[in-house]
Amino acid sequence: MQSYIVNEEAVYCAIGEMTVKFQLLENELREISWFCAEPTDATAGPTRGFGRIVDHAKKAVSAYLDRSGVAKDAAIRSHFAAAFQRCRDVATRRNRAVHSLYRHYETLHGKPMLVRTWTEKARQGSIEIKNERVTEATITSVLQDLKVAYEAMFGLHRQLMYSLQTILARGEGRPTILTS
């Protein structure tokens, strides 16, 4: 039987790091929305709720690409769709890490184990309590996923600002392929 010794302070430091990095991802989505918005649009998007920010950015990008004449089957559209889904997935994992109840449990071998607990909807009117042993990989995998999500959005934002603008400025017709 493998025993895990977890430094509780390191777990909470990692959760703090995750919170800051998640704010970077949220900010990138807002910047994409602002870039895609019409200059006369006074609304900068929703002010609360990451899911609403993702939805708003998704709609803003789609409308912007439509106005720019980007083909419906262009690669950039599928890249954005995948990146928006990645944002939602990492938000779920981040929420579970940040909002879980963390407890120490004694084991048969006398070494305490750190476990996190959260609830999930199991079916209509039913909630299930879930538990997971906390290891270094538990937290670092969320940070890695968060980094990938941020880098994808950052890259796509740059494609909107530079690659797409160059194609449109040259008047090369409807952009059908944009890759990162």
Image: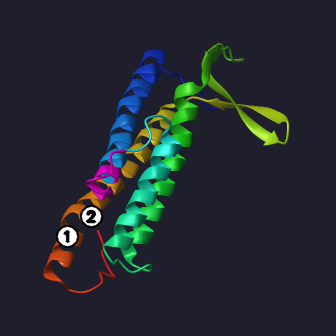
Q: Is residue 101 left or right of 139 when viewed as pictured?
A: right
Circle 1 residue: 165
Tell me residue 131's x, y (percent): 69, 30
What mark, if any, has residue 160 been given in the picture?
Answer: 2
First in sequence: mark 1 vs mark 2? 2
Q: Mark 1: which amino acid?
A: Gln
Where are the magenta residues, as a range? 33-43
Q: Is residue 111 above or below residue 41?
A: above
Q: Is residue 122 above or below residue 167?
A: above
The single residue placed furthest to the front in the displayed view is 40
Tell me residue 14's x, y (percent): 41, 27
Tell me residue 172's x, y (percent): 20, 86
Tell me residue 98's x, y (percent): 52, 27
Of residues 124 and 170, which is closer to you in this image? 170
Quarter of image, res 58: bottom left
Secondary element under disc 1, as helix, strand or loop, is helix
Secondary structure predominantly adopted by residues drawn in magenta: loop
Q: Mark 2: which amino acid?
A: Leu
Of residues 95 and 140, which is closer to you in this image? 95
